[in-house]
Image (cartoon, rainbow, N blue to C red):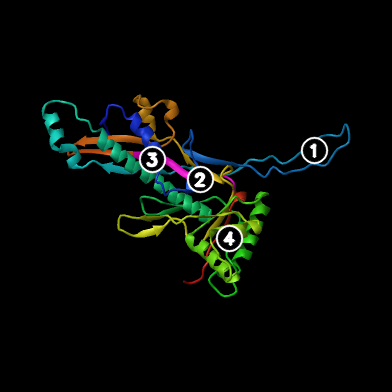
Amino acid sequence: MQLVDLVPDLAPVILAARQARDARNTLEQFLPTVNVLSVSYRLGRTQRLDQTVPVRAIDAPATPIRRPGVVDVKGDLPAITPIVNLSEQDLTNDMVLARQLAGLDVDFTPAVESGAALAAVTVDNTLELMRAQLLSTGVVSLVADDGLTHAVDFGVPDAQKFVPQTAWNAEGADPFGDLVRWHRAFIAASGGPAGAILGSDDVYARLLAVMKAQFPQQPIGQAALSAHMTDLRLPQFVTYDRTMRDASGSVTRLYPDDSLSFLPAQDAPVGRTELGITQEAVQQVLRGTLQADQAPGLTIVTLGQDDPVQRAVKAAALGMPVLRDVDSIVIASAIFGPR
């Protein structure tokens, strides 16, 4: 299908679609979305700025130090392009037919806006799945349209990946001791405390159960657990239990229910979700729909053909969450044994 003008001005639709968000997609707080003037990511990782130098005598030469910002991960941003086919009902209802037969323009704006919103949220949900993978494993697993899986590994050191010695649902487990040890690993790697612990409600419930067993005579709830975490100098817990249902009806979790991640505070995110410039955006700039500085980010186009008569709305994005600071994440997995 070729580009067609189904609405007089597509720019408002594009800009509105860029703001479309699924309210359940909350991992963006750790990997905020940014538009970039590129079609690839290239990481200049900044080493911790905590170097010191020996004092020198007057007239002695200056002391060289390491230069931060070694580039060690790079690659192309993958394409995400859902399409919404406008139904025959959208194209040939009574009012549309009457206006077409009278030689009048037909306003397809409502159908285009609806299709654009659906396509945009689908892009955002795809990025949310990638965010969950990245935060729980340090790797983004991209399933291509050929069915093959391509892994993008951002190189989180093994010293920052843990499995408890004793599963938390087994006798002799020490969940709070594990959290303290893992947080110490975060501090050793990043140079400061974590801002949040990301995990499932199952992990959170297990911590509550452990506290209730330790203090059977006291009422234990969210406030008591938060206070205990503070006493142990641990960051507060952020629960995330988003699931998605695919076309076959299968329900899957985005973030594993037996993992957790130590992450920095929101004002110093561990990375970002980069959206580059698509060819669809370039075409919209050349057609005068978008300004050049509006090219980066999600783009909406309307497509059509006449044999057979079809119209569609497509969202196009080049994007992926990128882990920019591998020193500021600690991942624990397989927290529970068989359940």
Give residue 254's quadrant in the image: bottom left
The amino acid pointed to by label 4 is Ala
- Please tell me which of labels 2 and 1 falls first in the chain: 2
For the residues carrying marks 1 and 4, which lies nearer the camera in this image? 4
The amino acid pointed to by label 1 is Thr
Which residue is at 64% across, 54% downward? 186
Residue occupied by mark 2: 29
Give the CA distance from mark 1 to mark 3: 52 Å
Residue occupied by mark 4: 224
Q: Main secondary structure of the magenta part?
A: strand
- Please tell me which of labels 4 and 3 falls first in the chain: 3
Badge number at residue 63: 1
Residue 5 is a magenta residue = no
- Please tell me which of labels 1 and 4 falls first in the chain: 1
The residue stretch that appears in magenta: 315-325
- Please tell me which of labels 1 and 3 falls first in the chain: 3
